[in-house]
Structure formats: C-alpha cells, structure tokens
Amino acid sequence: MTSLSRRVFCASACAVLAGVHGRVWAQGNWPTSKPITWVVPYPPGGSTDILGRAIAQRLSKLLGATVIVDNKAGATGTIGSAFVAKSSPDGFTLLGTSIGPQAIVPNLNPAMAYDAVKAFEPITLIGTIPHVLVVGAALPFRHPEELLNAAKAKPQEISFASGGNGTILQMQGELLAMQAGVRMTHVPYKGDTPAIQDVLAGHASFMFAPIAAALPHIQSGRLKALAVTAAIRLKALPDVPTMAQAGFKDFVVEQWQALYAPAGTAKVIVQRLNQEVLHALKDPEIIAMADKLGVTLVGSSPQQLADVQKADLAKWGKVIKDAGIKAD
C-alpha cells in the first residue's frame, strides 16, 4: 500500500468511526438530552392537535422525557411538514399530521419543498376519521341521488364546501362529482368550522364533514346526514347508510392521522417511538378522547403506515388527474 493509499484509508476509516461514534452518542442521549418537539402542521383546536397533545403528554411520561407540541400551521399543513422534513434526524423532532400534506397535496403541487415519502420515516398510523355527507336542513334532499339529480338539472348551481384546497374534504366532493358525472362548484374555507357554518347558513349546498364536527348539528336537526364514508354504518348514526349502500362503489374514505420522523432517523428510535405511542393509544383517557373526536384508533407498524400512504397517494393522484384539479 502506498503512502497516499494509507492516508486515504486511514482518513476513510476515521470518518466512518466518527460517524458511528456520532450516531451512538446521539442515540445514547436520546430522548433526554433536550425536549422532543411534536410538530402539528395545523392551528390549535382541531382533532389532529387535540389528540396529538394528549398522546405527546403520555409519550413524555413513557419516555421519561419532555415532549412539547408546536403548531406550525399554513399551506394545508405543508409548512409544518417542510419544517420537520428539514430537521435533524435525531429523534427530537416529530410530525403529527394527517392525510392532506402526506397523500393529497403532493399530487397537487409536485414542486413542494419536500418529498412526502422520501423525507420521512413512518412511525405509526394513529387513527382514522370517517366523514358524513351533510346538507342544510332547509334543503329538500334526503338521499345523495336527490342531491346529484339537482346538480344534473342545474350544473354548477350546487356547491360543496371544504376546509381548504387540497384537503380530504375537497377530494370527497370531487370524487362524488366525478363518479356521478356532474359539475359542482367547490367553495374552500380556511378550516372545517367555517365550512360547516356556511352549510348551516345555506351559503353552500353540502359538504363531507368529520363526524365529530357534524354530529351535534345533525342531532339538533340543523343538518341532514345523507350518507357516511365508512365501510359500515356508524354507531352514532345507525339510520344513515354508507356511500356504498347509497349506490356509490369504491367510496370508503377515511381521513387518517399519523406520526412521522425525519428521514434517516435511527430504526431503534423509530421502533421505540412506535412502541410507546401504541402503549399510549391503550390509555383509557386517550380512548375516550378519540371516541369523542370521532377517531377510530389504529396503532400500526411503520410499514403499515407506509403502505397506507402509498395507496392514498395513488388513489387521490388519480382523482386529481381525472378531475383536472389544479392547485390555487
């Protein structure tokens, strides 16, 4: 071996050892050397935020570490997601997010600041939320078919509200219009609450709403539930058919919430986080909170989350392409 070769070999070996030592040091000091930040890419008060805070609190106790929640809202969740994507993969920054930024917006905006798959390590699918197709009480519709007949008779006069462009609520309205072969006007709002308020007021004809947000208005008679997007009827609305029972095939749609870490996070950290979050999901208080929010807790493996994300990227990518939906 020449002198140059020996120097190159020694330099390479030292670099490898330094890298290994650095990773061991980082893992050895995780999770107690500094606070863990659980980033929620939405404003406070929504189901992703409320459930995320509750799980983070349990996670703090289970890990013996400080876990803080940081809301970084904006751009349909992509601002917070981009922040985590660019963070150090040391286990101290996590993303508690939902389907929108991970499986819908990437199809609308291919030039996003991060790759929704390659930029993250999946940890677990926390839970799913079924939605309900609702109309204002003043409208005559009692079945999805009646709503669509009105849309066919007067194209684009029937409008549907959503919590914003690129949200799962918008996608369901677009999917319904596409399956029925009708044209309807999408009215995006800055969040689910103002969208529901305008359906209540009659400013928008209908929307697909999260069950927990819509249920009080359905029970009070201010909204009428026409169908649910779950695979089976909901216990809270036993008389309301599923979309399949109402005549719409392949319309099982559920919003999901999940936990991710930046790509490159050590598998031992990902596995520990998965283990402890699944433990937290068995807490009776978490179960009760999820039930109140209309969330069906899941607690998946990292690979199962990756598979769900991949399937939804393909599904909503096709809807966006076929319907000609463009980002604003």
Image (cartoon, rainbow, N blue to C red):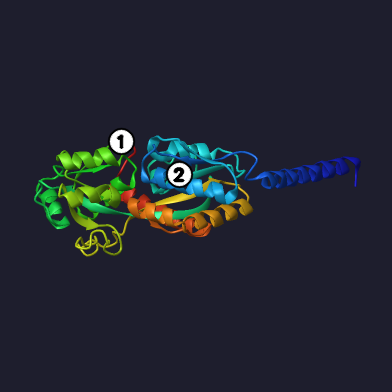
Foreground pick, 155 / 131: 131
Q: What percent of the width, then of the height, locates residue 115?
A: 49, 44
Q: What percent of the width, then of the height, locates residue 148?
A: 15, 53
Give, as a three-letter code, the residue at label 2.
Arg
Q: Which residue is mark 1?
A: 190
* Rendered residue at 53%/49% (across/down): 59
Give, as a three-letter code, the residue at label 1.
Lys
Q: Is residue 118 visible?
A: no
Mark 1: few/some/many CA within 10 Å (<14, 14-19, 20+): few
| Quadrant of the snapshot with the C terminus | top left
Q: Is residue 251 visible?
A: yes
Instruction: Kindly report which numbered mark, 1 or 2, lies closer to the viewer in this rendering.
Output: 2
* Rendered residue at 72%/44% (across/down): 25
85 lies left or right of 213: right
- Give the SS element for disc 2: helix
| Callout 1–callout 2 Cβ contact below 8 Å | no
User: How far is disc 1 from disc 2 in space, using C-alphas?
Assistant: 22 Å
Q: What percent of the width, then of the height, locates residue 213?
A: 28, 47
Vertically, is 82 above or below 274?
A: above
Foreground pick, 184 / 27: 27
117 lies left or right of 8: left
Q: Which residue is mark 2?
A: 53
* Rendered residue at 30%/36% (across/down): 190
Instruction: Say which label, 1 or 2, has the lower sequence index.
Output: 2
